[in-house]
Image (cartoon, rainbow, N blue to C red):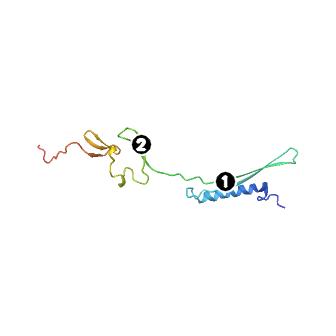
Amino acid sequence: MDLLNLGEFAGGALQEKANGAMQKVLENMQDPNTPYKVKRGITIKIGFVQNEDRDDVMVEMSVETKLAPSSPVHTMMSIGRDLENGEVYAEEYGKQIKGQMSLDFARTPAGRVQQIDGDTVDTQTGEIIETGSKVVDLRKAAL
């Protein structure tokens, strides 16, 4: 004689919860953003509370899953201070080398160029684009 049939117990509610938990575990196992080695699990709890006369029992059922957590995502950021307005900034550079400029950004936008102490300066990078001072050829200078 079967005392417990999960498919019929509580009108099939326990079977439904167990199937839902199994679906969550399988989806978690297929998620590439979770570590593959972490053990997953399903726990079915059935609790019984009877009355004083011992002729009536309240049955409480719960299904819990233990899933692998999502793996962390990493990136890199360069931080500094904007020379134009003095504000602190953070800029993601991902897989590039810090400070490396991609060819898409080779031209300096006009709004970023300023004259500082006679030099033309890119205010975002601090690069001196054109110097305002005269270059002295020391080979021709009189001693």
Q: Residue at x 63, y 59 (%)?
A: 26
Q: Amino acid at mark 2?
A: Tyr
Which residue occupies the foreground of this view, 73 or 132? Answer: 132
Give the number of callouts: 2
- Residue 128 appears at what percent x and percent y? 28, 45
Which residue, as the protein is rendered here, is positioned at the far front? 110
Q: Please say if 68 is above or below 122.
A: below
Which residue occupies the foreground of this view, 12 or 142? Answer: 12
User: Hey, which quadrant is residue 96 in on the image?
Assistant: bottom left
- Between the residue at mark 2 and the residue at mark 1, the CA separation in whole angstroms equals 42 Å
**In the displayed structure, does residue 83 sit left or right of residue 130?**
right
Q: Please say if 68 is above or below 117.
A: below
- Residue 6 appears at what percent x and percent y? 77, 58
Q: Amino acid at mark 1?
A: Thr
User: Hey, which quadrant is residue 12 in on the image?
Assistant: bottom right
On residue 89, which mark appears?
A: 2
Q: Residues within 10 Å of mark 1 (few under 14, many from 20)?
A: some
On residue 18, which mark appears?
A: none
- Residue 113 appears at what percent x and percent y? 31, 44
Q: Earlier in the sequence, mark 2 or mark 1?
A: 1
Q: Is residue 41 visible?
A: yes
Q: Secondary structure at mark 2?
A: strand
**In the displayed structure, does residue 110 sit left or right of residue 139?**
right
Q: Which callout, 2 or 1, points to the residue nearer the camera?
A: 2
Which residue occupies the foreground of this view, 110 or 1? Answer: 110
Q: Is residue 102 visible?
A: no
Which residue occupies the foreground of this view, 58 or 129? Answer: 129
Q: Which residue is mark 1?
A: 65
- Residue 43 appears at what percent x and percent y? 70, 54
